[in-house]
Image (cartoon, rainbow, N blue to C red):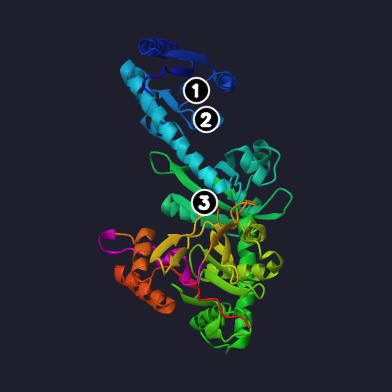
C-alpha cells in the first residue's frame, strides 16, 4: 500500500488546512482534491479516491450526521474528520459515527497526517474485508436489510435511513420521522415495551438483541430486533439513542412454525405415554422412535437363502451424543440382485438434527423410483431438502454417501455429497483404500444449493472385500495435548484390523478411538455401516 500514491478528497472550508494538506501530500507523491458537502456525493461517484478528509460544518449532532452520511455514501473509503483540538468529546463521537480518524487543525503535521491516512486506509481495508466475508456467508441463506436510527428519550426520531423507512412501510425517512412522533404508542404493539427499552438503556447504556412486535404504517404487525446505545453529554444526561433495526419477521414465523411442529410431535408422544412423565421420558421415547427408523433386519441376497449364506453381509454400530442423533443410515434391497446403502450426517446433534434425519428418511422413501442411479438419487434428495430448509431460514448442513451394489457382478456404483470417503477393505490383499469420486473433486453437502450435479462413480468389489461407511464423529475426537484423531490415522488403525470379522473389527476400532480420546468418550454422533461381499452362494 505504501507504494501507491494517495488521492484524497477534502470536504470543508478551511483554506489553510486545505493548502497545508495539499502541499504535504505532494511531498509523498499524492494529490488533494476539494469539494463542498453538497457536491461530495457526485465527486465520490466520479473519481476514485484513497480516503476522505472531512471538516464538519458544526461540532454537534448535525456534524455527526454528516459523518455517518459520508460513510454510507462511500462505505469502502475511510473518512478522517478534521476539527479543533479542543473538541475532544466530538472527536470521540466522530469515531463512533463511523470515522476512521481525527486530525486537529491547530496541530497540523504533514507526516502525522500522511501516517493517519495510511493507517485509516489499512483499517478500512480490514473492516471492508470482514464485512464482505460476513455478507457473503449470510447472503447464501437470506438478505437482511438493516435500518439505522437516532431517537430522543421522549420518543421522536431525529434520524433514520431508507432501510428503516422500508422496514416500517414508509415512503422515505422524512415520511417516517413526520408520522412517528410517539414511539411508545405509534410503533410498539405491546404496551410498556418502550418503557422496558428506556429502563434497560438507563441501566446499561447498550442493548443488543431487543426483539419486539411493531406496527408498520399500514398497521400490519412485524417483528424487529434492535441493537442500540445511549449517547450522553458530559454531565451524563442522555442526549439520544442510536442503533440498528433488523426485520426478523420471517425468522419469528419460522420459529413459530418449528415450535408448532415440535409441539405437535410432543403432543403425539404424550398421547402414547403417561401425561405426568417428565421431558427426559419424552426424549427417551424419541430416541427409541429414531432407533426404530434404522434397519431392524438386513436384506438377503439371493432372498431364498439362509441369512448366514447371503452374498452380502451387513453390520452397523450406532451411538448418539445426546438422546437423539443427527446420523442416519438405511439398507434396502432394490431388486433380487441389488442392495442400496445410504448414510448421512446432519450438522450437530439433538432434536433439530434428528428432525432433519426424519425428513431425509421420508424423502428417501419417496425417491425409490430413481434409487438405482446414485447421482440422480442424491440430486433429487438435495432438491427436496433444499426446498424444505430454505423456508425456515435455518441452514442445516447434511453430508451423505449412497451406493448401489450388485452381488452377481460385484459392481458398486456410488455418489458422495460432502461425506467422509468410505473405506474399501480388501482382506485378501491386506489393503485399505478410500472410495473417491472418479473426477477427484469433492461435491457439496445436501441442502445448501438449489441444483448441484452429483456424479456416479463405479468400482469393482471381490469376495472377501468389506465396504466401511462412517460419519465424522468417528474420527473428529481430541486426544492428549490437543492432538486430533485424523482420517489418516483411522485408515492405519483399520489396516491393523483387516483380518478381523466385521463386527469385531468395528468394536475394536471404536475402542481404539475411544481410548485415544482425552475424555474416553465420543463427543459427536457416531455411525458405522459395513457391507461385506462374501463368497457368492451357489445357485441351484
Q: Nearer the viewer, mark 2 or mark 3?
A: 3
Which quadrant would residue 78 be assigned to in this image? Answer: top left
194 or 403: which is nearer to us? 403
The Cα–Cα distance between marks 2 and 3, rounded to whole angstroms, is 54 Å
Mark 1 closeness class: few <14, some 14–19, many ≥20 residues within 10 Å:
some
Q: Quadrant of the C terminus?
A: bottom right
Question: Is 65 covered by the magenta stretch?
Answer: no
Q: Which residue is pictured at 46% across the width and 45% down the height?
A: 230
Work out which residue is located at the far right of the displayed protein and give it.
218
The Cα–Cα distance between marks 3 and 1, rounded to whole angstroms, is 57 Å
Q: Position of residue 276 (x, y in %)?
A: 54, 88
Q: Which residue is mark 1?
A: 57
Q: Which residues are magenta?
A: 462-482
- Cβ–Cβ below 8 Å for labels 3 and 1? no
In terms of secondary structure, where does tag 3 sit? loop
Q: Which residue is mark 2?
A: 62
Q: Position of residue 513 (x, y in %)?
A: 34, 69
Amino acid at each position: 500500500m505504501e507504494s501507491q500514491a494517495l488521492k484524497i478528497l477534502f470536504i470543508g472550508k478551511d483554506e489553510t488546512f486545505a493548502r497545508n494538506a495539499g502541499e504535504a501530500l505532494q511531498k509523498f507523491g499524492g494529490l488533494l482534491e476539494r469539494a463542498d458537502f453538497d457536491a461530495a456525493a457526485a465527486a465520490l461517484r466520479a473519481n476514485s479516491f484513497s480516503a476522505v478528509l472531512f471538516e464538519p460544518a458544526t461540532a454537534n449532532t448535525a456534524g455527526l450526521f454528516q459523518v455517518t452520511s459520508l460513510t454510507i455514501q462511500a462505505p469502502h473509503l475511510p473518512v478522517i474528520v478534521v476539527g479543533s483540538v479542543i473538541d475532544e468529546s466530538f472527536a470521540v463521537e466522530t469515531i463512533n459515527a463511523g470515522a476512521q480518524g481525527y486530525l486537529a487543525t491547530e496541530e497540523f503535521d504533514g507526516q502525522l497526517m500522511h501516517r493517519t491516512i495510511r493507517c485509516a486506509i489499512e483499517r478500512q481495508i480490514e473492516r471492508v474485508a470482514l464485512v464482505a466475508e460476513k455478507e457473503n456467508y449470510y447472503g447464501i441463506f437470506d438478505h437482511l436489510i438493516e435500518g439505522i436510527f437516532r431517537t430522543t428519550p421522549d420518543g421522536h426520531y431525529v434520524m433514520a435511513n431508507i432501510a428503516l423507512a422500508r422496514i416500517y412501510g414508509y415512503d422515505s425517512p422524512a415520511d417516517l420521522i413526520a408520522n412517528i412522533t410517539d414511539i411508545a404508542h405509534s410503533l410498539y404493539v405491546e404496551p410498556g415495551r418502550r418503557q422496558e427499552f428506556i429502563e434497560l438503556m438507563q441501566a446499561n447504556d447498550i442493548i443488543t438483541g431487543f426483539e419486539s412486535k411493531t406496527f408498520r404504517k399500514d398497521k400490519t404487525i412485524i417483528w424487529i430486533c434492535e441493537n442500540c446505545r445511549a449517547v450522553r453529554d458530559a454531565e451524563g444526561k442522555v442526549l439520544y439513542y442510536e442503533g440498528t433495526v433488523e426485520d426478523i419477521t420471517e425468522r419469528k414465523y419460522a420459529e413459530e412454525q418449528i415450535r408448532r411442529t415440535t409441539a405437535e410431535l410432543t403432543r403425539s408422544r404424550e398421547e402414547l405415554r403417561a401425561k405426568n412423565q417428565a421431558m427426559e421420558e419424552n426424549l427417551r421415547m424419541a430416541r427409541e422412535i429414531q432407533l426404530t427408523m434404522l434397519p431392524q433386519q438386513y436384506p438377503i441376497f439371493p432372498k431364498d437363502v439362509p441369512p448366514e449364506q447371503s452374498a452380502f453381509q451387513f453390520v452397523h454400530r450406532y451411538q448418539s451424543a445426546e438422546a437423539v442423533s443427527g446420523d442416519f443410515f438405511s439398507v434396502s434391497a432394490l431388486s433380487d440382485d441389488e442392495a442400496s446403502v445410504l448414510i448421512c450426517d446432519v450438522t450437530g446433534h439433538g432434536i433439530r438434527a434428528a428432525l432433519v434425519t426424519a425428513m431425509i428418511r421420508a424423502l428417501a422413501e419417496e425417491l425409490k423410483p430413481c434409487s438405482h442411479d446414485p447421482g440422480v438419487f442424491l440430486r433429487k434428495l438435495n432438491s427436496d431438502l433444499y426446498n424444505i430448509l430454505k423456508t425456515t431460514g435455518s441452514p442445516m448442513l447434511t453430508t451423505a454417501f449412497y451406493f448401489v451394489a450388485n452381488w452377481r457382478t460385484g459392481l458398486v456404483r456410488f455418489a458422495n455429497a460432502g461425506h467422509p470417503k468410505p473405506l474399501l477393505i480388501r482382506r485378501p490383499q491386506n489393503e485399505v483404500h478410500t472410495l473417491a469420486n472418479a473426477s477427484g473433486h469433492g461435491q457439496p453437502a445436501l441442502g445448501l444449493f438449489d441444483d448441484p450435479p452429483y456424479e456416479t462413480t463405479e468400482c469393482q468389489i471381490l469376495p472377501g472385500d468389506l465396504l466401511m461407511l462412517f460419519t465424522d464423529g468417528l474420527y473428529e475426537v481430541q486426544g492428549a495435548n490437543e492432538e486430533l484423531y485424523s482420517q489418516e490415522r483411522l485408515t492405519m488403525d483399520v489396516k491393523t484390523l483387516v483380518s478381523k470379522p466385521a463386527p469385531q473389527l468395528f468394536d475394536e476400532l471404536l475402542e481404539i478411538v475411544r481410548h485415544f480420546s482425552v475424555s474416553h468418550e465420543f463427543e459427536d454422533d457416531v455411525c458405522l455401516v459395513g457391507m461385506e461381499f462374501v463368497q457368492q452362494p451357489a445357485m441351484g
